[in-house]
Image (cartoon, helix red, strand yellow):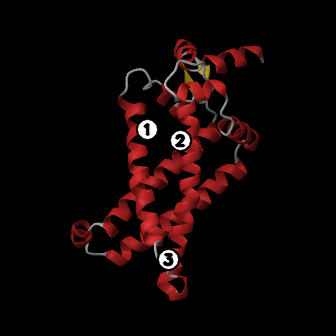
Amino acid sequence: MVPRFGRTERALHWVHATGFFAMLASGLVLYLPALSELVARRNLVKNVHIFTALTWAVAICLVVALGDRRRLASDWREIEALDRDDRRWLRGGRAAQGRFNAGQKVNALVTAAFAVLFALSGFFLWLGERDHRFLFEGTGTVHETLTLVSVALVSGHLYLALIHPTTRHALRGMTLGEVREDWAREHHSKWLEERRGL
């Protein structure tokens, strides 16, 4: 077995995932009339949605502040650096990959951007209800569009993590922190070679 993700990385992933699904559930109740009527506690659900968003933001900050910031900074540098092998991989070619493959890098970048856009649009939706000067046209559309695209991305992520036979083993890295060396060699050979060189 080869260590892949530390506690801080795993905590960040699961805090984000838990917050996303809680906000998705409460948001769907607010958005879909049939669910809204079924629950019949719109104000409570709205408060749960907002409280979950605030808790998610605070939890993310705590994980970053109290966790292994050096490792997270290293992860971010790797994620934002798309090299020649990553570009080849994204075009469908075979190319050696680092600890994060190009798809995971793109997913992380999109997820981070969406988190900021969700927070901003959600804040202005909340503020606009209290002060109509901040009720901007299209804010709700942005929030809804982000939700729809996020659901599609998360569906693909869940498929690769839970169902697809060649990538399913990656889930072990995000739950227990380690993966099989033969799997790492097949999917993240560049990372394995770099690790051996340390």
Contact (Cβ within 8 Å) of mark 2 with mark 1: yes
Label 2: element kind = helix
**Residue corresponding to mark 2:** 107
Q: CA distance from mark 2 to mark 1?
A: 9 Å
Please tell me which residue is depicted at 37% across the width and 78% down the height of the picture: 43
The quadrant in which the N terminus is found is: top right
Among the 4 quarters of the image, the one containing residue 4: top right
**Residue corresponding to mark 1:** 157
Label 3: element kind = helix
Asked if residue 171 shows in the view, the reply is yes
Q: Residue 160: where, in percent of width, then height?
A: 41, 31
The quadrant in which the C terminus is found is: top right
Among the 4 quarters of the image, the one containing residue 33: bottom left
Q: Residues within 10 Å of mark 1 (few under 14, many from 20)?
A: some
Tell whether 24 sits left or right of 90. Answer: left
**Residue corresponding to mark 3:** 126
